[in-house]
Structure formats: structure tokens, C-alpha cells
Amino acid sequence: MSDNHNQNVVPQCPYCGSTNVFKDALANWDIDSQEWVLASEYDSGHCESCETGLKRFNWVTTQPSTKD
């Protein structure tokens, strides 16, 4: 990743270019916090736009959001 603090990166589908992508992961239920806790993430993912299983993602730069 870049050290440039003026830009953010976003994962992108290498097939259709969409950023509507998801990464597969494993979560455990934490009874104390009453929420799912990420335990592990896998290399695979999925593009919701073109419905393709992904083994890799393209990473593209974007301008940082301006949240007040």
C-alpha cells in the first residue's frame, strides 16, 4: 500500500471493476459482548455485481472521504 496519506485504497473486482466486493471470513459469537468477533479471514471473496468468486482483488486509489 502507499504511504501517501492523501489517498485511500479500495478493493475492486478484477473482472468487472466493481467495488461491491466481499471477503470471506470466519467469526465467532462472543457471549460477553453479544456480537460477532472476527477470528480469521480467507484469501477468497465474491463480487456481488458480476457474481464471480474471487481469489484476488485489484486495489485502486481513491480520494479520502470528508467526514465532519
Image: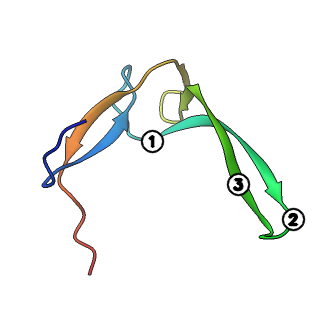
Dot 3, how many residues are within 10 Å of its Cα: few (below 14), some (14-19), or many (20+)?
Answer: few
Side of 56 relative to 60 (left or right): right
Q: Quadrant of the C terminus?
A: bottom left
- Quick one: SS at disc 3? strand
**What amino acid type should be assigned to the residue bearing mark 3?**
Val
Q: Residue furthest right?
A: 31
Side of 13 relative to 38 (left or right): left
x%, y% of residue 11?
Answer: 37, 37
Residue for point 65% across, 37% down? 40
- Label 3 to label 2: alpha-carbon separation: 10 Å
- Label 1 to label 3: alpha-carbon separation: 22 Å
Q: First in sequence, mark 3 or 2: give its number.
A: 2
Dot 1, how many residues are within 10 Å of its Cα: few (below 14), some (14-19), or many (20+)?
Answer: some
**What amino acid type should be assigned to the residue bearing mark 1?**
Asn
- Label 1 to label 2: alpha-carbon separation: 31 Å
Viewer-side label of 1, 3? 3
18 or 27, nearer to the observer: 27
Residue for point 37% across, 25% down? 16
**Residue 15 versus residue 5 in the image, above or below:** above
Residue for point 28% across, 74% down? 67
Q: Which residue is mark 3?
A: 37
Q: Which residue is mark 2?
A: 31
Residue 23 found in image quarter = top right
**What amino acid type should be assigned to the residue bearing mark 2?**
Ile
Side of 45 relative to 28 (left or right): left
Residue for point 56% across, 28% down? 45
Q: First in sequence, mark 1 or 3: give its number.
A: 1
Viewer-side label of 1, 2? 2
Residue 57 found in image quarter = top left
x%, y% of residue 66?
Answer: 22, 70
Residue 20 bears which disc, if any? 1
